[in-house]
Amino acid sequence: MAQNGLSAKICGLSDGDAVAAAVTGGARFVGFVFYPPSPRSVSPEKAGELAREVPAEIFRVGVFVDPDDALLDAVFANLQLDYVQLHGSESAARAAEIKARTGAGIIKAIKVAAPGDVAAAEPYYAVADRILFDAKAPKTLEGALPGGNALAFDWRMLAEQAAPAGGLPWLLSGGLNIDNLANAVRISGARSVDVSSGVESVPGKKNPELVRRFLALSATL
């Protein structure tokens, strides 16, 4: 695994070939989506199978949208996640409950479209272990998901903040791909990045070659 360069998260993995590409390519995080409306969603059982191919040194992340306790329990019965990524409207109090229930770290996704949106991370500083800044989908986008919409936001909004996540580690997400990654990192100052749609052949289907190319590039930045 590459230790220099960016820490990269390959999110929305749903098959063994994509998991293998992420693992051998040097991903620092792998993400499994537990949100049925998403084309990347997997069952707890399927995620458990895929996670068995992930070495212990790579962080396993579960992506949830306003999960209830039953879903959390079902997932953790099948695999032990290192992080629960919350991509809905979860309050800081609910995030703390989830952290206590699961024993996993918390990654809170903050959706950004305007400069003031970055400050929405503040209530989570005391409970989150990492913050993820993603693009906020416009209300006019038909079929928009909480994440994975292949949309980017103005990365300068992060660069303008001395500490966008209040001192917490943070990840840049939203429309990243091999064509814009270098520019996104240069402008935002990100040292950790998250990609999903940018390494897919079609929505929900990862392209192992794109996964490998994205990770190879991230190792150089």
Image (tube, helix red, strand yellow):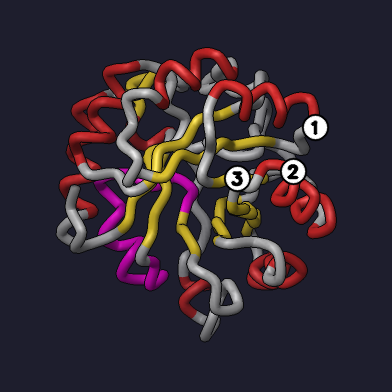
Q: Amino acid at mark 2?
A: Arg
The crowd level at tag 3 (other Cα within 10 Å; few <14, some 14-19, many 20+) is: many
Furthest residue toward bottom: 162
Q: Residue at x 32, y 17 (%)?
A: 16
Who is closer to the viewer here, 101 or 2?
Answer: 101
- Is label 2 or label 3 in front? 2
Q: Amino acid at mark 1?
A: Asp
Q: Residue at x 65, y 26 (%)?
A: 35
Dots 2 and 3: beta carbons under 8 Å? no
Q: Which residues are magenta?
A: 173-190
Q: For this view, does 22 lie left or right of residue 51?
A: left
Which tag, 2 or 1, sits closer to the chain's start? 1
Q: Is residue 178 magenta?
A: yes
Q: Which mark is residue 101?
A: 2
Which tag, 2 or 3, sits closer to the chain's start? 3
Give the labeled residue for mark 1. 69
Which tag, 3 or 1, sits closer to the chain's start? 1
Residue 192, x across and y down, in percent: 38, 59
Report the number of discs.
3
Residue 138, x across and y down, in percent: 68, 45
Label 2: which secondary element: helix
Separation of disc 2 and disc 1 at Cα? 8 Å
Give the labeled residue for mark 3. 85
Q: Amino acid at mark 3?
A: Gln
